[in-house]
Image: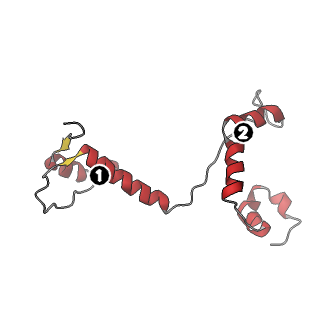
Amino acid sequence: DKNKDYVVAEHQALLCASKCTFVANLFPPLPEETSKQSKFSSIGSQFKQQLQSLMETLSTTEPHYIRCVKPNTVLQPGIFENFNVLNQLRCGGVLEAIRISCAGYPTKRTFEEFLDRFGMLAPDVLDGYIL
């Protein structure tokens, strides 16, 4: 049967009891089944459960993304090539993502919140501002 590759309960218990935390976390203990449905859990159903758990975890987070951009082709400090940077941002979808984000989900933070969060990156700029 398609997607009916079953995990043997003994194997599941053995891997769950592993001293390696990574392996043990990959194979959490199976809940006790009281129905006649099946003694085994298929790989497909386990994947579905794990995917649902992942989606629940992701829905409780506030994601932040970092996109690295090369400022120049010679990889030297202090050189900034406008055309290459703009091209990277355009090809990476960053400009379109910003446009969509601003149109549908604008982020509004006060200047003070911005300085409080990112001011440590440019402390010389903070000298003129009182928080």
Q: Amino acid at mark 2?
A: Leu
* Residue matched to label 1: 24
- Determine whether the residue tagged by mark 1 lies in a helix, strand or loop: helix
Residue at 16% across / 49% down in the picture?
40
Note whether residue 81 is visible.
no
Classed neighbour count for the residue bearing mark 2: other residues with Cα under 10 Å, few (<14), some (14–19), many (≥20): some
* Residue matched to label 2: 89
> Measured along the vertical axis of the image, is residue 10 above or below residue 105?
above
Q: Does the CB distance between marks 2 and 1 fall below 8 Å? A: no
Q: Is residue 12 left or right of residue 58?
A: left
Counting from the top left corner in percent of width and height, residue 6 is at 18, 43
Counting from the top left corner in percent of width and height, residue 57 is at 44, 59
Q: Earlier in the sequence, mark 2 or mark 1?
A: 1
Q: Quadrant of residue 109?
A: bottom right
> Measured along the vertical axis of the image, is residue 71 above or below residue 105?
above
Residue at 80% across / 59% down in the picture?
123
Residue at 83% across / 37% down in the picture?
78
Q: Nearer the viewer, residue 90 or 127?
A: 90
Counting from the top left corner in percent of width and height, residue 10 is at 14, 49
Q: Nearer the viewer, residue 62 or 27?
A: 62
> Measured along the vertical axis of the image, is residue 12 above or below residue 88?
below
Residue at 71% across / 55% down in the picture?
103
Q: Amino acid at mark 1?
A: Ala
Residue at the outermost top position: 74
- Image quarter in which the N terminus is found: top left
Q: CA distance from mark 2 to mark 1?
A: 41 Å
Query: Which one is in front in this view, the residue at disc 2 or the one at disc 1?
Result: 2
Residue at the outermost left position: 36
